[in-house]
Image (spheres, grey):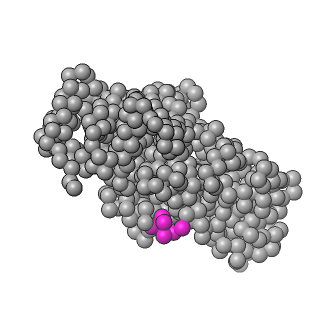
C-alpha cells in the first residue's frame, strides 16, 4: 500500500509534536581540578558571581572567582565524590536561602536546610544571601531602644534599634551570654506597637555542643518561638561558615522589610574572617596583612551595613524590595580578641564599621564582675538618642562615677591618706560595681532597671555593707512589685521620669530602706 504525502506529513507531525517542549538550554562546564573544598571549572561562559552550581551527587557550589579561562568555585559539601572531568551545571540563580515565618523556632544550616530533626521547612519564599544595604534616603536615625535587659549596658552603653554594636573581648568573658540574655529579653516585646522582636542567632565556627547549649537555654526561656538559629559549626566547611552570617542577615531582612524589628547576632565575626581567609587563599587570591585577603574589610562592611532603621517611607523609594517602612535590623557582631588586643587587624576593622563597642575584660570577669563590661573602653555612638528618657535621667552620672572609681581605686592601692571626698567616691563606686552585677539568663525589665540604678545613684546604698547590695536590690524589686506595682507600671508605660514620678520612686525606695536589715 502506497502512502500519500499527506499521510507521511501527518505521521511526522505526530512524532515531533512534543519534541520542542522537551528541549532546554543548559550551561555546563567541566571540572579541571578539585581539592580542599575548592574546584576549578572550564566552560560556564555565562556564569555569574555567587551563582549556585550543581555537581554530580547533589553537591552544590558557589562561583567566587570568574577568571579569563576558568571559574573558581567553593563547594558546599564534601569533595570526595567529585573528580576531574565531571560535568557541572549552572543553575542560573544567585545563592539564596528560604525566608519567612516558617523558620521561626528552627535550627538551620547556612543554606537554610533544617538540622534540628523537626522535619522540612515549608518556606514560601527565598531571598539571595547578598543584598544591597539600604540607601541614605531609605534610612532614618536610630530613635528606638533595643533593650538588652542588662543593667550595665542599658544604663551606660545603650543600643538602639537599627544600630551595629560590637561585642568584643577575650575567650570566655561572657560575650555569647550577653547576646543570649538580649534574645531572652525580647520576649517582653510581644505586646508592643511594633510587635514581637524577631531574633536571628548565627553561630560561626563554634563547637556543636556550644550551639546546642544555647538552643537549650532559649527553649527553656521560651525564646525559640521568635528566634532563628543558623549554625555553621567548626566541623563544617569554610565555605558554609563564610555564607552563614549573610544567610542569617537575609532571613532577618525579610521581617525588617515588613515593618518588623529584628535583632541579629553574629557569633563570631573573627571566625568568619578566618573562614573567608581559608576560602580566599585556596582560590589563590593574594594575601595581605596577617595573611587576610585585601577585601576582608569589604566582607564585613557588606554584612554590617545592612543593619538599619528604615524610614517610614522606605517602600515608596523601593517598592519591589520593601513591603512597608519603619522596620529595623539591629546587629550585634561578636569579635574574639587575643590577650585583649583591640588594636589587631580584624578588631580594628570591625570597630571602624560599627557604631560602638561593648568591651568585656578578662580581669573583671575573673574578679567575679559579671557582666565584665569595661566602661572606660566601651562606647555607644548613637544609642543615647534611643535610650529611655527615664533611664537617661537616673543613669546620667553613673558612667563618670564608675570611671572615677576605677582611677581612684588604682591610686588608693598605695595606701595613701585619702580625703573625705575621695573616700566617698570610693564608697559609692564599690557599691555601684556590686549593683551592676547580674546573673546569667536573668534579664531585667526597664522599670526594674530604673529602680535599681536610682537606688545606686541616689545614695541609698552608700551606708550599706558591699556584700548586702545584692540582697538589698532583690528585696527592693520584690517590694516594688508587691506594694508599688502601679509606680513600676507608670515607669514602663510613660518612659519619662517627671518630678512627681521620681519623688514617688524615691519615697518607695526610702520606705524599703527603713525596714531593710541585711542578713548576717
State the quadrant of the C terminus: bottom left
Q: Residue at x 70, y 77 (%)?
A: 80
The reply, left or right, for residue 241 in relation to residue 67 is left
Q: Residue at x 43, y 62 (%)?
A: 214
Residue 336 pos. (x, y %) = 59, 54
Q: Is residue 276 above or below residue 195?
A: below
Residue 398 pos. (x, y %) = 40, 33
Residue 313 in sight here: yes
Q: Residue at x 29, y 31 (%)?
A: 458
Q: Is residue 210 magenta?
A: yes
Residue 130 pos. (x, y %) = 61, 47
Give, as a single range, the part of the protein colored magenta: 207-212
The reply, left or right, for residue 145 in relation to residue 85 is left
Q: Is residue 457 magenta?
A: no
Q: Farthest residue in the front direction?
A: 417
Residue 37 pos. (x, y %) = 71, 68
State the quadrant of the N terminus: bottom right
Between residue 168 and residue 183, name the one nearer to us: 168
The reply, left or right, for residue 258 in relation to residue 342 is left
Q: Farthest residue in the right direction?
A: 69
Residue 60 in sight here: no
Q: Is residue 254 above or below residue 404?
A: below
Between residue 387 and residue 153, name the one nearer to us: 153
Q: Residue at x 67, y 59 (%)?
A: 275
Q: Is residue 294 above or below residue 429?
A: below
Q: Farthest residue in the top direction?
A: 499
Q: Residue 267's quadrant in the figure?
A: bottom right
Q: Residue 23's quadrant in the figure?
A: bottom right
The dominant secondary structure in magenta is helix
Between residue 474 and residue 323, name the one nearer to us: 474
Amino acid at each position: 500500500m502506497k502512502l500519500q504525502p499527506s499521510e507521511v506529513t501527518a505521521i511526522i507531525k505526530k512524532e515531533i509534536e512534543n519534541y520542542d517542549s522537551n528541549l532546554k538550554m543548559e550551561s555546563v562546564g567541566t571540572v579541571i581540578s578539585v581539592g580542599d573544598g575548592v574546584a576549578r571549572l572550564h566552560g560556564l561562559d555565562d556564569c555569574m558571581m555567587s551563582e549556585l552550581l550543581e555537581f554530580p551527587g547533589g553537591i552544590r557550589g558557589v562561583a567566587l572567582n570568574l577568571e579569563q579561562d576558568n571559574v573558581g568555585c567553593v563547594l558546599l559539601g564534601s569533595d570526595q565524590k567529585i573528580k576531574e572531568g565531571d560535568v557541572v551545571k549552572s543553575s542560573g540563580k544567585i545563592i539564596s536561602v528560604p525566608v519567612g515565618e516558617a523558620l521561626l523556632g528552627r535550627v538551620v544550616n547556612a543554606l537554610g536546610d533544617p538540622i534540628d530533626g523537626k522535619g522540612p521547612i515549608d518556606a514560601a519564599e527565598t531571598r539571595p544571601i547578598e543584598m544591597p544595604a539600604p540607601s541614605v534616603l531609605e534610612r532614618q536615625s536610630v530613635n528606638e531602644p533595643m533593650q538588652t535587659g542588662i543593667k550595665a549596658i542599658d544604663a551606660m552603653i545603650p543600643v538602639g534599634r537599627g544600630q551595629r554594636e560590637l561585642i568584643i573581648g577575650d575567650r570566655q568573658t561572657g560575650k555569647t551570654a550577653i547576646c543570649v540574655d538580649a534574645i531572652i529579653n525580647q520576649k517582653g516585646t510581644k505586646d508592643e506597637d511594633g510587635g514581637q522582636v524577631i531574633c536571628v542567632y548565627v553561630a560561626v565556627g563554634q563547637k556543636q555542643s556550644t550551639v546546642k547549649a544555647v538552643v537549650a537555654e532559649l527553649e527553656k526561656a521560651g525564646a525559640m518561638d521568635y528566634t532563628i538559629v543558623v549554625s555553621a559549626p567548626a566541623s563544617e566547611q569554610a565555605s558554609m561558615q563564610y555564607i552563614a552570617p549573610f544567610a542569617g542577615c537575609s532571613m532577618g531582612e525579610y521581617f525588617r522589610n515588613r515593618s518588623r524589628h529584628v535583632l541579629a547576632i553574629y557569633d563570631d565575626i573573627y571566625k568568619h574572617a578566618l573562614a573567608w581567609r581559608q576560602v580566599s587563599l585556596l582560590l589563590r587570591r593574594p594575601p595581605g596583612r596577617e595573611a587576610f585577603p585585601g577585601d576582608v574589610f569589604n566582607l564585613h562592611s557588606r554584612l554590617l551595613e545592612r543593619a538599619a532603621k528604615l524610614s517610614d517611607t522606605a517602600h515608596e523609594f523601593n517598592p519591589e524590595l520593601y513591603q512597608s517602612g519603619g522596620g529595623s535590623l539591629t546587629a550585634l557582631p561578636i569579635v574574639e580578641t587575643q590577650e585583649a588586643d583591640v588594636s589587631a587587624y580584624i578588631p580594628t576593622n570591625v570597630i571602624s564599621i560599627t557604631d560602638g563597642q561593648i568591651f568585656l575584660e578578662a580581669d573583671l570577669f575573673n574578679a567575679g564582675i559579671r557582666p565584665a563590661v569595661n566602661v572606660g573602653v566601651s562606647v555607644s555612638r548613637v544609642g543615647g538618642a534611643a535610650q529611655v528618657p527615664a533611664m537617661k535621667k537616673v543613669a546620667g552620672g553613673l558612667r563618670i562615677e564608675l570611671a572615677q572609681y576605677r582611677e581612684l581605686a588604682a591610686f588608693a592601692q598605695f595606701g595613701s591618706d585619702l580625703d573625705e571626698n575621695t573616700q566617698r567616691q570610693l564608697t559609692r563606686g564599690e557599691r555601684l560595681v556590686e549593683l551592676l552585677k547580674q546573673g546569667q539568663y536573668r534579664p531585667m525589665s526597664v522599670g526594674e532597671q530604673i529602680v535599681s540604678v536610682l537606688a545606686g545613684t541616689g545614695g541609698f546604698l552608700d551606708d550599706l555593707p558591699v556584700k548586702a547590695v545584692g540582697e538589698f536590690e532583690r528585696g527592693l524589686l520584690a517590694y516594688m512589685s508587691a506594694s508599688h506595682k502601679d509606680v513600676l507600671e507608670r515607669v514602663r508605660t510613660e518612659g519619662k521620669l517627671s518630678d512627681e514620678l521620681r519623688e514617688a520612686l524615691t519615697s518607695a525606695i526610702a520606705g524599703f530602706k527603713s525596714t531593710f536589715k541585711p542578713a548576717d
